[in-house]
Structure formats: structure tokens, C-alpha cells
Amino acid sequence: MFEFLFFDLDDTLLDFHKAEAIAVAKAFRDQGLEPTPDLIRRYSQVNKLHWEMLERGELTREQVLVQRFAFLFRELGLPASPEGCQDSYENYLCMGHYFVDGALELLQYLSPKYRLFLASNGTARVQESRLKSAGIGPFFENVFISQHLGANKPERAFFEACFAAIDGFDRSRALIIGDSLTSDIRGGNNAGIQTCWFNPRGAAPLPSIHVDYEVHRLEELKTIL
């Protein structure tokens, strides 16, 4: 049924929440701030809101990267440099990786049977470094990063650029797997391909976004394919 599988990277294959918490704590310390659990939690919320604004076309990537810290520091009255914090954070985020449970085993299982592709909105330097650290780049026929394509998920233009780069691509035999309803699954809807929502935390669906399949553990994907 499927031949072309598009995977999101963050919180689908690699544990971004864990990497984010560690990197932002180090960046805050560089700014003389104590990285309390409340501060890190609030940063994560602010960061998510800013990336959602990128998905809606309300902010550019460059604006997101600095303004998330500027918003946080302004909201909490913290005397820190948004630009300096962004530079430190990105450098720390490039270091190392943490797999989502079952991710490596799933890629090893799927790669001989399907054509695998990566589709990410993340910053190119960070994603390329994390892919190298994790050693999973060779599983993918191509890695599509929005910063290189000039369009972001969930825009149809992002997916059309991906499809145009794949020999023999057939939209009816394609599936996107990702954790984000607003980025991955809506993107699949916009591109006219089937979708599989990786939902390990049991989040509620959104009525405006169609989900073809839903899994709570990566290994469940085998039953769909």
C-alpha cells in the first residue's frame, strides 16, 4: 500500500523535549539565570507558540529564534540577552541526541522495505548535527529541511518541493508520520497524502485536521504498514 514514508524528526524519532531542556538550561546559565523547572517549562510553552506562528506564516524563522527568548525575558523581567541566549542554545542543541523509544529499531526494520525520507522544520545546522550524532542519516533516501527548501511545514509548497525531488513519486503511496497535528498532519492534509499521528501522550485531536492513522508507540507503525 505504501512505498514513500516521510518522517518528522523532533519528538518523532529524536527526543527533542529532553534535548531542549538540557540545552536551554545551559544557555540560561550562560546568561546568569538559574534554570528552574518553572523557567524551562515556560520557555518550552513560549517556544511552541512561536513555532506555531511560523507554521501560520506570521513569523519568519529568524524572528522565531530570537523573539521566543525576547518574549520570555520581557514577560518575566529577566535581564538577559535574547541574541546571546539563542546563540548558546543552538550550540548546545547541536551536541548529542536522544532517541524516542523504538525509533532506531523501527528505522532498521523499515529501511529495507520502504523508501524513507525525513521532513523537518528545524534549523538546518542543528538538525544536520543531530542526524550525524544519531547515525540515522543513511536510513533516508533524502533529508528535506525547510530552511533549505524555502518553505515550512505545513505549507503545500514544502511538500511539493519534496515530491519533485523524488524519482517515481506517487502521492497515493505516500504516508507522513509525525507528532505535530499542526505541522506534520495538517501538512499531509495540505499535500494530499495520508497521515499517521504519533501521539504518545494521548493528546486530543483537532476537528479541523484529518488523521488517517494514530499510534501511541512507534512499533505500532508496523501494523499499519
Image (spheres, grey):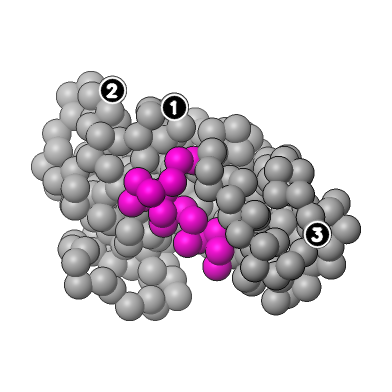
Q: Is residue 61 left or right of residue 70?
A: left
Front: mark 1 or 3: 3
| Pointer 1 or 3: first along the chain | 3
Give the labeled residue for mark 3: 79
Secondary structure, magenta segment, majority class: helix
For the point 47% across and 62% down, the residue is 49
Name the foreground residue: 90 vs 16.
Answer: 90
For the point 35% across and 46% down, the residue is 57
- Location of residue 145 by image quarter: top left
| Pointer 3 or 2: first along the chain | 3
Q: Amino acid at mark 1?
A: His
Name the foreground residue: 188 vs 82.
Answer: 82
Q: Describe the element under mark 3 as helix, strand or loop.
A: loop
Give the labeled residue for mark 2: 165
Q: Amino acid at mark 3?
A: Pro
In whole angstroms, how far apart are the C-alphas of marks 1 and 2? 13 Å
- Location of residue 153 by image quarter: top left
| Pointer 1 or 2: first along the chain | 1
Residue 124 included in the magenta stretch of the image: no
Q: Amino acid at mark 2?
A: Ala
In whole angstroms, how far apart are the C-alphas of marks 3 and 2? 46 Å
Above or below: residue 104 compared with residue 32 = above
Q: Which residues fall within the magenta stretch?
A: 45-61
Q: Describe the element under mark 2 as helix, strand or loop.
A: loop
* Residue 215 picture location, percent across and down: 33, 67
Q: Are marks 1 and 3 in contact (CB under 8 Å)?
A: no
Give the labeled residue for mark 1: 148
Neighbor class of circle 2 (other Cα within 10 Å; few <14, some 14-19, many 20+) is few
Q: Is residue 128 left or right of residue 86?
A: left
In whole angstroms, how far apart are the C-alphas of marks 1 and 3? 34 Å
